[in-house]
Image (tube, rainbow, N blue to C red):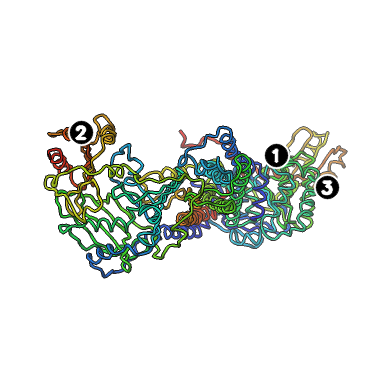
Amino acid sequence: MIRVEIRKLMRRPRTWISIVLLCLLPAIVAVLLRVTHLGPRPGEGPAFLSAVLANGTLFPAAALGIVLPLFLPVAVAVIAGDAVAGEASVGTLRYLLTRPVGRTRVLVAKLVSVLVFLFVAVSAVAVTAYVIGTALFGSQPLATSLSGAPLTTAQVVQRTVVVVLYIAWSMIGVASVALLLSTITDSALGAAIGALAALVLSQVLVTLDAANAVKPYLPTRYWLSWVDLFRDPILWSDIERGVLVQGVYVVVLLGFAWANFMTKDITS
Amino acid sequence: MSVVSRQTRRRWATVVAATGFLAAVPALLAARPVGAVAMSAHEVVAAAAASAGVPHQGLVQIDASLGLPTLPVVSDETKILSGTTRVRTWWSTSASWRVDTITGTGEEITIADPASTGGGVRQWSFENNSVTDVLYGPAVRLPRADDLVPPQAARRLIGWLGPQDKVLPLGARRIAGVDAAGAELVPGNPAGTIGHIDLWVEPASGLPVQVDIYSRGGTRPVVSSRFLDLDLTRPAPDVLSPSFVSTAQQDSTSEPDLLARVNALGSVPLPDHLGSLRQLTGPAATGLHGIAVYGEGLTRVFVIPLPDRLAGDVYDAVAPGSSVAAGGTRLTVPGGQATVLSTPLLSLAVVSGQRQGGHGYIVVGSVTATALKTAVTALLASP
Amino acid sequence: MIVTQGLTKRFGSVLAVDGIDLQVHPGDRYGFLGPNGSGKTTTVRMLLGLIFATSGSAEVMDQPVPHGLKHALPQIGALIEGPAAYPHLSGRTNLTLIDASGAGTSRRTRRARVDAALEQVGLAGAGRKPAKAYSLGMRQRLGLAAALLRQPQLLVLDEPTNGLDPQGIREIRDLLLAMNAAGTTLFVSSHLLAEVEQLCTRVGVLDRGRLVLQDDLATLRAPTGRVIVHTPDVAAAVGLLDGRVQERDGTRLVVRGLSAEDLVTLLVRDGLRVQEVMAERPTLEEVVLAVTGAGSDRIDSSGDER
């Protein structure tokens, strides 16, 4: 079933369009930087964007920083919101369930396919950004970590791979919200918008001092912690928490989706 | 109602119970009873004072809400006194340690490097891509992140304790997974603004793990510094002396901030008493060249003479009509005038004297605004 | 094959299906009739485990619904409320994906199965076009192909000939009859009386959620005992039959109390000409209309609406 879901995902034009758009955005930024040579001041703008002008190998990290706050969550919410609601609205859900495919299996397969999408999309961004970054800005044998220690290109690539994994996993909370809503409504768009609303709420709360008590539990709280991978030594504590928090969100939201979907009347 | 409603209810009950359990895990962990720690308050203070040799590494969070106005010339340096700062620290000995201030997209590192800086530190700034040697460790400077990590802050405050200040028992608390023994320091001088200082130490080593400073009557700490993660092992040597990229800008200075520049000014004669506050001499005033300290114990007032150029800068910043002055009161006394700013914990006056060739002063201390005004009046009245 | 007892579904305050007792025997061609909105689709969905009954019970292929359905569904082909396909994928890919979903199908024979199903419904040549370019009839055929993929023992078809042209209807009917002859039980829900009359051996009639009739078609359409005769010599015939004529309409007479052969003998002996004679049987339409009220899409004003 998981294989079938992945095949469905990969044969959708929407999947590839969103991945291309995700890759295109950092590319535009890179071209503008190359043409104008106007990098943001260090400490301003997305992480590492200031360092890219000097060393293209850091561009994948900067590119991920560019798509992370908005574009990646939007793409994920659209794909995950479509997962069940999309099948319901074209009517294929009823044929899937009478095939029969167990409802739990449908949910798990959908989640796994969204996860695959995430890894493919984030990796695509990183790989194209590496190609574009080194082509436009050249590469230096040593890059500067946040802690000032030099990083070899091999180290930068290794850490970027971990960043890819972490960012993909960071999105799983949004994906789970969209998937839950997708089992509640038959409107794929509604599910995606609902998930984005939850995301915006979380982003607003993260910046609010009054919300300090709930901050550690917000899904977006540790999103930017991938930057910690470029410290020396690497600061793992927030990354570990981020992985854990997303895991809890997956379990809880998928639990709700499961409880709702198992005995839901399918009238689509 | 349907033929499957029982399963539906059971499923929802399972999911809600599991969710509730997961949500309660942090609270349950926090609510584990703290083991009794057999240490008296005085033992806690003594252990903390003697903890400079305890190797450790960990992550520290500093929450400060001092409410200081942003003075243009020192805004970067005083950032740490308002808001939340996260710091990681590695400590081997007093001469070998490293403290990193972590920001969203950068990092600032301070490393003890007495050998090559003559007792000073080496600083890395990602934002400036620079490595700066701060030579000789100026005795007077603005607080840095490494001053505010719990062990350093606790040892400094304990060093200031006077005979009037009281040490009271305080319950144990779990901090960074450690059942820590507590002590409460209460200043004895009624003119002081510090209500009390709560201090907890790791009982076996005596390493301070949390320091909370309360203003008088305050219910929340104005400054709170605590370990989030703590590991009592000796850090690896390569962490303590990291290498920096060769492309970084290399620099050295002996005057890293405003106060240090003042310090280089040389001494200006200052009175022995400011009202009821006596100038401290000897060990209590160690190293404060050109700057006088008045008061007793935890209740202290610093008088910092300013060179003319700096006095003008700072005074303009707090002059009537500037944003900073809005919260302050203007004081005109025989011999000069001053703008007095007060926060729950600190009072600060920028003083411009008319006699003595137009000297300016910054007078700052943990005393009430009233006490500070008295001190400023006395300062300007002194010959 | 399908047995329900007091099967009821309530959506909020609306009683969609009201205590129906279905009985479909193995080998039946069961026609499930009813006007639009009478609860046919809701019943079909309940039988297939998509909707859960409010009360009552159902068994499909001797498996309790919904818990045993996972054992029964692999032997069931279904077309529920119209076909559905991923619009951007070809018919063949759609079938391949459906075949690959769920356990128990071999990957090696998948291609052959998909080809066979496309062949059966007459789509072999259109398998590569994306489904969104299909006509309504082609979509219907694709839906049927999906239902046929596993050589089902039970076919549950909701409006199977929707959108097909007359030749298509004929083609599909022949296909279904052939499958029934090979042992597949058919459960066809429809609001088209003619379709059911031509295809089915047994009918259930649903009206506003209630099963108002369920019987073999042969029983329902048993001769009434009256005979219909067409003769140009109407006046003579009426006189000869002397009060046995119950209805008279042009050259058509409805006669009671005589068998067809006796009637013909009687008329011919007297030199009267007979154009056509046959025993009267009720049409399915008459049977159904006799037991159902107005369709649910017709809303009459009720007393309390004043």
Secondary element type, mark 1 = helix
User: Which chain letter goes with mark 3?
Assistant: C
> x, y (%) of residue C30?
70, 52
Q: Is B147 above or below relative to A40?
A: below
Please tell me which residue is depicted at 21% across the width and 51% down the height of the picture: B194
The amino acid sitting under disc 1 is: Lys
| Residue C132's disc number | 1
The amino acid sitting under disc 2 is: Gly
Residue assigned mark 3: C261
Camera-side mark, 2 or 3:
2
User: Which chain letter goes with mark 2?
Assistant: B
| Residue B358's disc number | 2
User: How packed is label 1: few (under 14 Cα within 10 Å), some, or many (20 or more)?
Assistant: some
> x, y (%) of residue A174?
51, 48
* Same-subunit check for callouts 1 and 2: no
Secondary element type, mark 3 = helix
Camera-side mark, 3 or 1:
1
> x, y (%) of residue C59?
62, 60
User: Which chain letter goes with mark 1?
Assistant: C
| Residue A29's disc number | none
Q: How many marks?
A: 3
- Camera-side residue: A121 or A134? A134
- Camera-side residue: C23 or C239? C23
